Image (spheres, rainbow, N blue to C red):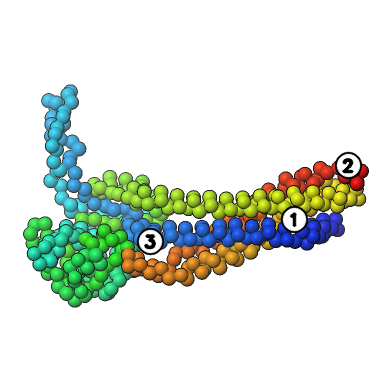
């Protein structure tokens, strides 16, 4: 125990003897950890923000009926043509409807499924917004207001007006901000829409919706399911989509395939719908880690050079230590202790400065018309980043000090003293 304390005392003395070089090495580690924490916090916050814009508004599984040509044509069913190859051109879609068959039974089954957090029925209606003599293409999404808000945070994207008015006020609509700007429609105005069949209906504007995706906001609007059914002249059972959220998002692909077979409908999982988006998020995270690790490695080379210079300058001291009974292992411990001291001190300072810099960025206003729900730059204060940062700091500085320490432990005191 006494010998260990003596080793640490000697290490502290050597650190103080070259305190300027020690400070430079510590500053390098501090800077590396600070930028590592800040980069990861900011990039992760950016990913979370984009997740909120896309993934939080996207169901884990969507059940619907896709309009497509029949895979099996009548000629394929005929026994007269089974032995040949049948070539058919200009195949048209089948007479299948957009409506989900037995939607009530499907929703009852989903309620009893333990894997399902919740679901929100939806009707997608292609319409034209009538603006004087001009017709603008649009889409009205008929939604269950309460379910849509619970599962997909609908009210967070209603920038003006009350989202619940869709349920309380008959024949009402919340316009996409881009569509409202095109029509110069204000809250309380009445607009006219025409369906693809030519039916017309007047709807009262009760709010604006802004998703942050400008192209969508120019065409998409929202109404209640009852209003949309009335617009399309459909019965109360008419539903075109069921949006499902699961307890485990990773289960979406297999569960989607299961639901497609069970309910005889098309099913799209969130991984398939947003594969390119998820790839972008992982690439940004990888770049952040790569830059942070590079900074730490550069700081490690600085420590390596400083310890190498210290060994050359302290040859006499090392020789005396070994001549007085200190083993090569003890000398190695001294220089590893110096490196780890720099790593711990610089790492802890880096964590503190990284948090402060992240908090500063988090307080900077970020106001843009396309992202009304975002008020400041996004930062993610995940404790895992700080844990990874301090581990990288210790590993980098340990390796930077290990090689000079091994070199010092092999010094022959006789050669050094004889040279003097």
The spot of residue 106 in percent (x, y) is 25, 54
Left or right of 35 in this view: 65: left
The residue tagged with tag 3: helix, strand or loop? helix
> Which percent across, then down, holds residue 265?
24, 48
Tell us which disc is closer to us: 2 or 3.
2
Q: Earlier in the sequence, mark 2 or mark 1?
A: 1
Quarter of the N terminus within the rendering = bottom right
Which element is circle 2 on? helix
Kindly identify which residue carries mark 3. 52
Q: Is residue 334 above or below residue 133?
A: above
User: Is residue 141 something that shows in the picture?
Assistant: no
Residue 264 visible: yes
The percent coordinates of residue 304 (x first, y second) are 70, 50
Residue nearer the viewer, 264 or 419: 419
Q: Which badge, 2 or 3, is on the more N-terminal residue?
A: 3
Marks 1 and 3, how far apart at CA: 46 Å
Q: Which of label 1 and label 3 is nearer to you?
A: 1
State the residue position of label 2: 415
Residue at 18% across / 47% down in the picture?
67
Picture layout, residue 272 above or below residue 45? above
Q: Under tag 1, what secondary structure?
A: helix
**Residue drawn 17% across the image and 23% down it:** 83
For mark 1, what is the residue? 338
């Amino acid at each position: 125990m006494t010998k260990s304390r003596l080793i640490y005392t000697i290490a502290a003395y050597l650190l103080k003897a070259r305190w300027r070089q020690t400070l430079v090495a510590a500053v390098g580690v501090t800077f590396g950890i600070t930028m590592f924490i800040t980069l990861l916090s900011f990039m992760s916050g950016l990913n979370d923000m984009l997740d909120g814009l896309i993934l939080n508004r996207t169901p884990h599984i969507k059940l619907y009926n896709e309009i497509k040509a029949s895979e099996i044509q009548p000629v394929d069913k005929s026994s007269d043509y089974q032995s040949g190859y049948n070539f058919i051109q200009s195949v048209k879609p089948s007479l299948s409807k957009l409506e989900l068959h037995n939607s009530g039974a499907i929703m009852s089954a989903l309620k009893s499924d333990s894997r399902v957090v919740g679901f929100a029925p939806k009707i997608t209606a292609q319409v034209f917004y009538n603006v004087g003599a001009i017709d603008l293409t649009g889409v009205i999404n008929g939604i269950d207001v309460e379910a849509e808000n619970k599962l997909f945070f609908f009210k967070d994207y209603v920038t003006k007006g009350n989202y619940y008015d869709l349920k309380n006020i008959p024949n009402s609509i919340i316009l996409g901000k881009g569509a409202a700007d095109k029509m110069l429609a204000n809250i309380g105005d009445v607009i006219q829409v025409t369906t693809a069949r030519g039916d017309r209906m007047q709807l009262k504007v009760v709010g604006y919706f802004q998703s942050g995706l400008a192209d969508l906001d120019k065409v998409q609007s929202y109404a209640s399911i009852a209003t949309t059914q009335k617009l399309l002249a459909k019965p109360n059972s008419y539903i075109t989509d069921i949006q499902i959220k699961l307890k485990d998002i990773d289960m979406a692909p297999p569960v989607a395939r299961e639901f497609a077979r069970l309910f005889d409908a098309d099913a799209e999982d969130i991984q398939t719908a947003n594969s390119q988006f998820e790839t972008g998020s992982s690439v940004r995270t990888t770049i952040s880690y790569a830059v942070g690790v590079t900074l730490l490695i550069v700081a490690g080379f600085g420590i390596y050079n400083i310890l190498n210079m210290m060994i050359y300058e302290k040859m006499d001291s090392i020789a005396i230590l070994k001549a007085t009974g200190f083993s090569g292992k003890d000398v190695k411990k001294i220089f590893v202790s110096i490196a780890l001291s720099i790593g711990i001190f610089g790492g802890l300072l880096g964590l503190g400065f990284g948090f402060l810099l992240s908090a500063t960025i988090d307080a900077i206003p970020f106001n843009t018309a396309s992202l009304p729900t975002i008020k400041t730059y996004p930062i993610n204060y995940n404790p895992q980043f700080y844990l990874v940062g301090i581990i990288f700091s210790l590993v980098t500085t340990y390796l930077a000090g290990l090689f000079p320490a091994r070199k010092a432990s092999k010094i022959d005191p006789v050669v050094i003293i004889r040279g003097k």
